[in-house]
Image: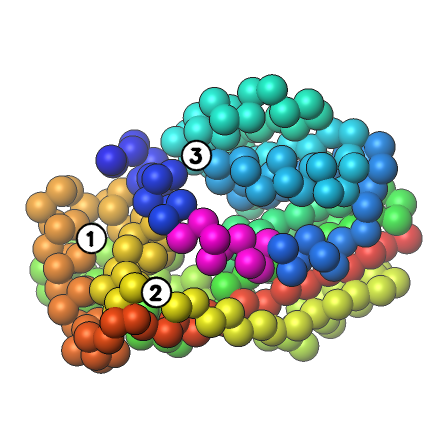
Amino acid sequence: MTTTDGWDPARYEQFAAERRRPFVDLLELCRPVPGGEVADLGCGTGDLTVELHKALRAAHTVGVDNSPAMLATARERHAGAGGVTFEEGDLAEFAGLGLSLVFANASLHWVDDHAALLGRLRGSLGAGGQLAFQVPANFTHPSHTVATEVAAESRFAPTLADEPALHRGRQVLSLDGYAECLYALGSTEQRVRREVYGHVLDSTASVVEWVQGTLLTPIRRRLDDGAYEAFVTTYRERLLEVLGDESPYFYPFHRILCWAVFD
């Protein structure tokens, strides 16, 4: 299935169990907000938004995403979830008021200038509000570097040379960088850590399916069907050359988890 915005809920959810693991860890860092207002930025299909809402006992949780395809799935699945709504919005422009918690699981790396972004999200919180986010930090793995190399080839470069998705690692700060930024914003308590999630996939080729659900989504949006098929074929061949054709394949995925509370 191809959507107008490039995101495919079914493809993304091929690895739903693996993608849920960092969500659970991030949720465990958060404190309940009985009767509070929560924003889940980059809510996707909404399954984890509903789980977040129930776990924190919030009065209202809004899931925000810029993918019409993801939001359509979220609204269809969770139309009866009391206290949960979904809105289309750009995370780069999100600004709430008096929120108890701003939560972002694997979404903020799509946004530039994290220092400014976190400052805006801090401004969305009320007294005692929490900010919790998790960002990928796997940009040096061949699953990412090979995509950048293929995009630089002469047949793809005219279309993809300026594609920001291929350079998202430049936006992700270091552990110290996030800790210092949260402190400068007035956090009274914080947790910042790096976690390596080991995913046992069926084969090395499964990594191709993984990145088609995330990293390659903006590339799919920019290429026509034939060009995209050629890109994926080249990417798959090159990736197997680098990683080897293993079955099963152990895919180590680094992520940075941050939580902070503010007066």
Q: Quadrant of residue 119?
A: bottom right
Q: CA distance from mark 1 to mark 2?
A: 31 Å
The span shown in magenta is 15-23
Q: Does the magenta-highlighted stretch encompass residue 16?
A: yes
73 and 90: which is toward the camera: 73
Residue 196 lies left or right of residue 223; in this view the side is right
Q: Amino acid at mark 1?
A: Thr
Residue 121 part of the magenta segment: no
Q: Which mark is residue 70?
A: 3
Q: Are marks 1 and 2 in contact (CB under 8 Å)?
A: no
The mark tally for this picture is 3
- Amino acid of disc 3: Met
Residue 159 image label: 1
- Which residue is at 61% across, 50% downward? 104
Asked if the residues shown at circle 1 and circle 3 are in contact, with their CB atoms under 8 angstroms apart, the answer is no
The image shows residue 96, relative to residue 171, as above or below, that is: above
